[in-house]
Image (tube, grey):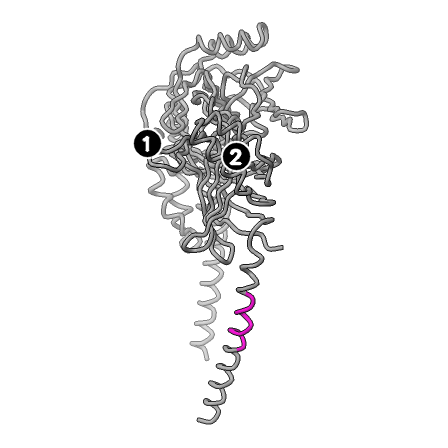
């Protein structure tokens, strides 16, 4: 009887001790579990992932998460941020869904560097002062920053800008000629005149996954301080499953874009009629300082 | 053993009844086939750039009468494509192809018997779509003034086919008709179905 009561006391003490010890650990693991994207999901691209890599099973082994995770957690964002940015490549599936049917294709966006602050100011200033024709001239005289690849065709990027958002980054890209005239194959297709550029917007998270929209043939105008995009297509092309290629994530090439933060010009999309007008304002929560 | 025999007999009776019932239906079906009739098809294009698909409807009110058909065919043989176009556009409308909200008048529709059922050929009096014409550096569209469809249907009303959504025609050297398609490859008509009313 005495032995039993001693055993019970030991078990009780043991349970209390374990629960007291593990409660904060479980709490930590629940808050910063391996599936929690609030905590350094971009560790995928960093060497620190090796230590948190075991955390994919954190519910089973909470101690493995909490202890090694803590010292590396602060190092991960620094490493990740150092590796993000140009040069980088994104692949995307472009989807068009319209009344008569649907089409899908693959595109690749290769950004060698982001537009410098001076060039950005020149292009945006040209649009504000001289309108679309001045914008086109400024865009085409600015330096080549990469290209958009569609099939075997490459379309030079003359404007590329990244801004930080709540969920990661927003990347705006403008090419110096149209990529595709959606609906342009119809016998009574509208005139292509004036649709001289293509505009892409991608929203990617910290890992490099995201989505976006694309006006494959567009013209731009300034309205109420915001850049308005008129799309040739009835509706913008959806960029689904945008992925950042890992090869460029490990690139050690220096970043060329300027570092001074600047307010981002917001973009507003318009289709053929007013009911298709879609505004993306407010454009950003802040600038990443990459141009 | 008796139960088994009964079951077998019952099954054979049911089977014979089904066969007897089906025989006049098949005869009826053959009588029902023919214009006016409607076909639904999924048009599919696969290329190096991607995949596109659309639904089209082919409504044949009647097939081109032999007199008109011969006039159109001989115009192509004797006068070439310009004469063919004139003859085609002079021929009466026998239905239409529906794509989205657009309708394209059929001026030539012909059905012939094939091994598995029927072959239906349709020509519209204007092009339906210039596949590849969406690209910035598209090739000239001049001369591609009709659309041509061919569907192979079985007796049930299922089939497949091909379509040149923008085409021009010329007499083939060895006889027959050669279709010059604007697209790099013809559009496939997959899962063609005859609409049952």
Disc 2 or 1, which lies upstream in sequence? Answer: 2
**Is B22 inside the magenta-drawn segment?**
yes
Task: Tell me which segment is drawn in magenta.
Answer: B17-25
Q: Secondary structure at mark 1?
A: helix
- SS for dot 2: strand
Q: Position of residue B151 (x, y in %)?
A: 47, 46
Residue A101: image quadrant is: top right
Disc 2: which residue: A96
Q: Is residue A249 magenta?
A: no
Q: Are marks 2 and 1 on the same chain?
A: yes
Q: Residues within 10 Å of mark 2 (few under 14, many from 20)?
A: some
Q: Is residue A277 above or below residue A51?
A: above
Q: Which residue corresponds to the image point at 55% horizontal and 23% vertical from the top-left?
A: A286
**Quick check: A216 left or right of A253?**
right
Q: Position of residue A68 (x, y in %)?
A: 37, 44
Between A196 and B20, the residue placed more toward the observer is B20
Q: Quadrant of residue A132?
A: top right
Instruction: Measure the C-alpha gap from mark 2 to mark 1.
Output: 29 Å
Question: Which residue occupies 53% across, 59% down?
Answer: B30
Residue position for label 1: A247
């Amino acid at each position: 009887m005495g032995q039993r009561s001693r055993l019970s006391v030991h078990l009780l003490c043991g349970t209390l001790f374990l629960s007291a010890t593990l409660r904060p650990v479980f709490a930590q693991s629940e808050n910063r579990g391996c599936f929690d994207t609030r905590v350094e999901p971009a560790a995928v691209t960093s060497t620190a992932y090796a230590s948190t890599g075991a955390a994919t099973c954190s519910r089973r082994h909470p101690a493995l998460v909490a202890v090694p995770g803590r010292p590396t957690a602060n190092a991960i964002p620094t490493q990740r941020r150092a590796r993000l940015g140009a040069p980088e490549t994104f692949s995307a599936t472009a989807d068009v869904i319209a009344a008569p049917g649907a089409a899908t294709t693959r595109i690749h966006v290769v950004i060698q560097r982001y537009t410098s602050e001076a060039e950005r100011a020149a292009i945006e200033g040209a649009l504000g002062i001289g309108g679309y024709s001045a914008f086109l001239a400024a865009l085409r005289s600015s330096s080549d920053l990469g290209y958009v690849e569609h099939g075997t065709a490459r379309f030079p990027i003359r404007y590329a800008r990244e801004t930080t958002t709540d969920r990661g980054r927003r990347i705006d890209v403008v090419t110096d000629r149209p990529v595709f005239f959606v609906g342009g194959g119809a016998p009574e297709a509208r005139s292509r005149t004036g649709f001289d550029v293509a505009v892409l917007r991608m929203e990617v998270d910290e890992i490099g996954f995201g989505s976006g929209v694309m006006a494959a043939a567009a013209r731009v105008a300034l309205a109420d301080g915001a850049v308005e995009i008129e799309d040739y297509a009835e509706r913008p092309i959806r960029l689904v499953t945008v992925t950042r290629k890992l090869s460029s994530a490990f690139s050690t090439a220096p970043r060329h874009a300027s570092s001074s933060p600047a307010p981002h010009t917001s973009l507003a999309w318009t289709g053929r009629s007013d009911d298709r007008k879609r505004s993306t304002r407010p454009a950003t929560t802040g600038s990443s300082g990459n141009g | 053993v008796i139960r088994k025999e009964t079951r077998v007999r019952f099954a054979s009776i049911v089977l014979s009844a089904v066969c007897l019932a089906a025989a006049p239906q098949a005869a009826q079906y053959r009588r029902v086939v023919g214009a006016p009739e409607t076909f639904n098809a999924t048009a599919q294009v696969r290329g190096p750039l991607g995949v596109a698909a659309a639904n089209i409807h082919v409504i044949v009110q009647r097939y081109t009468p032999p007199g008109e058909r011969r006039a159109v065919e001989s115009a192509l043989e004797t006068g070439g494509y310009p004469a063919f176009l004139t003859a085609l556009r002079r021929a009466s409308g026998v239905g239409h192809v529906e794509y989205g909200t657009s309708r394209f008048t059929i001026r030539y529709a012909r059905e012939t018997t094939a091994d598995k059922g029927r072959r239906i050929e349709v020509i519209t009096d204007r092009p339906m779509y210039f596949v590849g014409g969406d690209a910035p550096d598209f090739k000239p569209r001049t001369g591609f003034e009709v659309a041509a469809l061919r569907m192979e249907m079985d007796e049930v009303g299922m089939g497949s086919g091909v379509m040149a959504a923008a085409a021009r025609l010329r007499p083939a050297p060895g006889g027959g008709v050669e279709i010059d398609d604007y697209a790099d490859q013809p559009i496939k008509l997959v899962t063609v179905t005859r609409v049952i009313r």
